Amino acid sequence: MAYLNWINPADYTMECFLLFDRWALRVIFSDCSKYAWFPDKQRNYKLELAKALYRYPYVYNYARYKAPECWKFIDGLQSIPGDSWIPDEMRASELFIIKALEIYVVCFFPHIMNTLDFIRDWDEQHLHDLADLTDKLVLDVGAGTGRLTFPAAKKAKRVYASDPSDCMREYLTDRIRRERISNIRVVSGTAENIPYEDDTFDAVISGNVIGSSLNTQLAEITRVTKNGGWLVLCNGDDSYKRPSPAEQFISRGFEWFRHDTKTGGIIYDYRKQVVK
Ligand SMILES: C[S@@+](CC[C@H](N)C(=O)[O-])C[C@H]1O[C@@H](n2cnc3c(N)ncnc32)[C@H](O)[C@@H]1O
C-alpha cells in the first residue's frame, strides 16, 4: 500500500508511542512489514525501528510493561549494536517509522484524525441514505472520533460507539458530555472481539475499519446483529478514484453504493441484511 500522507512525521517523535495501547504495540513490536498495509517493504523494519528508538529507552520500558508479549521482539531490537549510529541517521529512521505507522499514529491523536479528508470532507447524508436508523439499537465498530456515531445518534434509539483506542474513547466521552448527548455509550472493543452477546443490535455500522482480517471481522459483526438487521460499511471521503467496488464485499453478499467526492475521489459504501 502507498503512503496516505495523513501526517507530517516531522511533527512527531517516538515519544508518541507512549500513548499507544497494547493492541497497537502488539502489532508494532512484531514484524509488521509483512502486513498488506505496510507501505515500504524494501526497508529493514527491525533495523529502522531499533535506530528510531535508540534514543528513547523509556519507550522500550513502556512497551515492555504495557505489552509483555512483545518482550522477545524488543530484546531483539535492543540487542542490535547502535554505538556507531549518528543523530541524523537515527532521526531519519524515526521519521520513516512514524510515517510507515501513520495509520496507527492517527488512532491516538483524535484532533489530527478530525482534520483528515475522510472525515473533513464527508457528508453525513451518505450514512442516512444507506440505512434508516430511526429508533434502532446501533453499534459503531471502530468509532474513532465519531464520524458515524454522532449522525447515527440523531436518529437511533441508542448507539454504542466501540473503539480499542483509549484516546479515541476519551475524545468521544468528552464530546458526548460537552454536547449533553444521552443516547451514546462508549465501549472498548475490536471488530474481531465485540463485547456483546449474539443478536444484540438492529444495525452494525463501521467506516474505514473492516478489512484487515475480513472473515473474522464479518463473522463477528454478523454474530452481534439480529436476524433481519443490517451491516453498514460507510466509508469516509478522499481523493482516490476507486476503479470498482471491492470484490471482497460483493462476493460476500453486500450491495454497493457509489458517490463522487468533492476532491474527485470515487467512494464505495456497502450494506447487507443479516439473515440467520
Ligand atoms: C481510520 S479510523 C476510522 C474511524 C471512524 N470509523 C471513521 O470512519 O471516521 C480507524 C479506527 O478504528 C480503530 N481500530 C483500529 N483497529 C481496530 C480493530 N481491529 N477493530 C475495531 N476498531 C479498530 C482505531 O482506533 C480508529 O479509531
Image: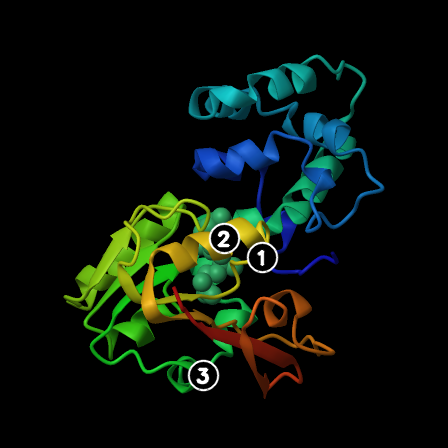
User: What label sits on residue 126 in the rendered view?
Assistant: 3
Please name the amino acid that badge 2 sits on. Answer: Gln
Task: In this rendered view, identify the residue nearer to me: 207 or 245.
Answer: 245
Q: Which residue is drawn at 49% across and 57% down?
A: 218
Residue under label 2, please give it: 217
Describe the element under mark 3 as helix, strand or loop.
helix
Q: Residue at x 42, y 47 (%)?
A: 190
Describe the element under mark 1 as helix, strand or loop.
loop
Closer to the N terminus: mark 3 or mark 1? 3
Q: Is residue 164 above or below residue 26?
A: below
Closer to the N terminus: mark 2 or mark 3? 3
User: What label sits on residue 71 in the rendered view?
Assistant: none
Mark 1 Cα shell of 10 Å, populated few (<14), some (14-19), many (≥20): few
> Ligand 1 within 8 A of label 1's CB?
no
Q: Nearer the viewer, mark 2 or mark 3?
A: 2
Task: In this rendered view, identify the residue nearer to me: 33 or 84.
Answer: 33
- Relative placement, left or right, of 33 versus 256 is right
Q: Residue at x 19, y 68 (%)?
A: 179
**Is residue 144 at all visible to an observer of this figure?**
no
Describe the element under mark 2 as helix, strand or loop.
helix
Please name the amino acid that badge 3 sits on. Answer: His
Please name the amino acid that badge 1 sits on. Answer: Gly
Task: In this rendered view, identify the residue nearer to me: 90 or 65.
Answer: 65
**Is residue 120 at all visible to an observer of this figure?**
yes
Q: Separation of disc 3 and disc 1 at Cα?
A: 20 Å
Q: Separation of disc 2 and disc 3 at Cα?
A: 23 Å
Q: Which residue is drawn at 44% across and 51% down?
A: 191
Task: In this rendered view, identify the residue nearer to me: 82 or 219.
Answer: 219
- Circles 1 and 2: CB atoms closer than 8 Å: yes
Q: In this view, does 11 lie above or below 200?
A: above
